[in-house]
Each structure stands twice: as structure tokens, then as C-alpha cells.
Amino acid sequence: MKEIASLGAGLLLASLVLAGCAADGGQEPPTEPLIGTYWKLAQLDGKDVVVGDNEREPHLVFDRHHRLMGSTGCNRLTAGFETRDEAITLSSLASTRMACAAALMTQEQRWMESLGRVARYEIVGDRLILEDDESNPLAELTANALY
């Protein structure tokens, strides 16, 4: 009898978990914080990102002092940032100016232009989606926690 009751409790718990997933539309809850996470650029303008041989991968790290640091995949980048709810403002966006392969330089230019247009962000699970002021996706990054 105990085994049947235990099985029934397990089935009830599984049903509640599944019902909870269905109630929120099946979306993953935010699992990684914006600040203190290494965000690796995965897609830019809907296209997969190229990483050059012996080059850093394009990424961003937001810190608690409102500084943004990262890489374009060729050069280092930096900026200031402010957030309010899901709105984000980047300021003083700058990068070093080293030359790389043509494909990386083209991607870098698109990445910097996209960062200059970022107005909103959304974190879904381990993904950070950067959007323009009309909520159009500009870039998608994946999380690698720094803790």
C-alpha cells in the first residue's frame, strides 16, 4: 500500500511540474544574471558567428560597476551601461583597432553597429537576446557563468 501511495504522490508531483510549464507557455525561466556572466556571441543578425583561428571568441561581460567589457572576435571592446527593467543603454562604446582577417573585420563592424543600436534585452534560460528599440533581435548570446 505504501508503494502505491508513494507512486501516486510522485505522479501528482510530476503533473504539477508539467502543469506549471504549460501555464507559463513552456518558456524557460531566466537562469543567468545579466551581470557577472560571460555572454558568448552565438548569432548576429540571425547568422551564426565566426570565430577565427587563434582569436578570442566574441563575447560580453557586464559588471556591477556598470562597465561592459568584451571582445569583437578581433579587438577588445568596452562601454558603460545602464539598465531599467528590460531596457538597456550602452554609452561610450569603443574598441581597439587591430587588423584581422577580412571576414572577422566585417563581422566586427556588424557587431559594433548592432551594439550601438541595442535598446532592450531579454534573458531566457541561458540565452541573452539583445534587441533594438522596436524589439527586433540584433544578437543572441549564450551564458557561461563566471562563478
Image: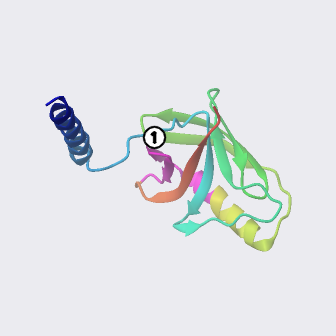
Vertical placement of residue 109 versus 7, above or below: below
Residue 75: where, in percent of width, then height?
Answer: 79, 54
Tag 1 residue: 87
Residue farthest along the front direction in this orientation? 1
Mark 1 element type:
strand
User: 41 and 72: which one is in front?
Assistant: 41
Give how far across and how far down residue 34 sits, in percent: 54, 37
Relative to 115, does residue 83 appear above or below in the rendering? above
Q: Residue at x 60, y 37 (%)?
A: 81
Type of amino acid at the residue the image marks with label 1: Ala
| Quadrant into which the C terminus falls | top right
| Crowding near the residue tagged with mark 1, few <14, some 14–19, many ≥20 C-alpha atoms within 10 Å | some
Q: For the N terminus, give its image quadrant.
A: top left
Camera-side residue of 58 and 105: 58
- Report the residue at 45% width, 40% height from top: 87
- Residue 45: x, y in percent? 54, 65
Q: Position of 5 compared to 137: left or right?
A: left
Whether residue 45 is situated above or below residue 35 in the rendered picture:
below
Residue stretch rendered in magenta on the structure: 113-133
Residue lying farthest to the bottom in this orientation:
102
Q: In the figure, residue 106 lies in which quadrant?
A: bottom right
Counting every numbered tag in the picture gives 1
Residue at the top extreme?
65
